[in-house]
Image (tube, rainbow, N blue to C red):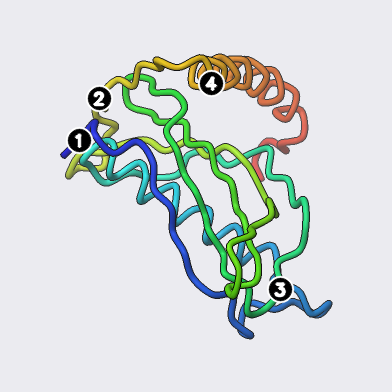
């Protein structure tokens, strides 16, 4: 039911196929897991198919090892008219104990779309707790920063390809 499930956690084991040349799980695998969790969270909140329009501020804090239990937590931290800002924390650790350490975190923005692929309205999320208000306010500040970064990045785009 749309507007009810604000967060989700995906759990799985890091596999040998996820390893980079340095013997740790490679960043591309982690980014795929982040995108999957963001989609599941956004679809659950909006009740609609959702597409990734932005992933940013990705911080790889610690490596993930093969055999680690990985938990990718995704939570709605702000909603616009058609967009959902999803806060992502990736935690990992030995599956034989309960301790998980933060390995990666970021923000992903998803947009709900209709059957024709056009943006469509999502339920509003209203923060209640002090912690949620801080998350929402942070999302708003990050939006303003992205506008400035986008304008700056435009200088790096070569006209005509």
Image point (17%, 44%), residue name: 115
Mark 4 and mark 1: Cα distance apart in space: 23 Å
**Foreground label between 4 and 1:** 4
Q: Secondary structure at mark 4?
A: helix
Q: CA distance from mark 2 to mark 1?
A: 7 Å
**What x and y, as percent, mark residue 20?**
74, 76
Badge 1 local density, few (<14 within 10 Å), some, or many (20+)?
A: some
Task: Classify the position of the N terminus by image quarter.
Answer: top left
Which of discs 3 and 2 lies nearer the camera? The answer is 3
Q: Which disc number belongs to residue 2?
A: 1
Name the residue that disc number 3 marks: 65
N-terminal-most mark, 2 or 1: 1
**Cα separation between marks 1 and 3:** 36 Å
First along the sequence among labels 1 and 3: 1
Identify the mark nearer the N-term, 4 or 3. 3
Distance CA(mark 4)–CA(mark 2): 20 Å
How many residues crowd around disc 3 within 10 Å: few (fewer than 14), some, or many (20 or more)? many
Q: Position of residue 93 (x, y in %)?
A: 65, 66
Q: Earlier in the sequence, mark 3 or mark 2?
A: 3
Look at the numbered disc 3 and give the secondary structure of its residue: loop
Query: CA separation, marks 4 and 3?
Result: 31 Å
User: Are discs 4 and 1 less than 8 Å apart at CB?
Assistant: no
Residue drawn 59% across the image and 57% down it: 31
Q: Give residue 142's position: percent from left, percent from top.
A: 63, 21
Q: Which element type, helix, strand or loop, lies under badge 1?
A: loop
Q: Is residue 144 left or right of residue 110?
A: right
Q: What residue is shown at x 45% (from left), y 17% (from top)?
A: 129
Q: Which residue is mark 4?
A: 131
Look at discs 4 and 2 and give the one toward the viewer: 4
Determine which residue is flagged by label 2. 123
Q: Residue at x 44, y 23 (%)?
A: 78
> First in sequence: mark 4 or mark 2?
2
């Amino acid at each position: 039911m749309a507007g009810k499930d604000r967060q989700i956690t995906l759990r799985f084991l890091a596999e040998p196929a996820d390893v980079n040349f340095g013997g740790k799980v490679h960043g591309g695998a982690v980014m795929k897991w982040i995108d999957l969790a963001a989609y599941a969270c956004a679809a659950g909140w909006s009740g609609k198919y959702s597409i990734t329009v932005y992933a940013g501020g990705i911080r790889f804090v610690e490596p993930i090892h093969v055999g680690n239990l990985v938990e990718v937590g995704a939570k709605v931290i702000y909603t616009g008219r058609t967009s959902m800002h999803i806060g992502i924390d990736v935690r990992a650790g030995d599956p034989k104990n309960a301790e998980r350490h933060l390995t990666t975190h970021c923000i992903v923005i998803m947009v709900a779309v209709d059957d024709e692929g056009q943006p469509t309205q999502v339920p509003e999320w209203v923060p209640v707790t002090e912690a949620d208000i801080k998350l929402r306010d942070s999302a708003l500040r990050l939006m303003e920063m992205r506008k400035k970064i986008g304008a700056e990045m435009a200088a790096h785009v070569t006209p005509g390809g």
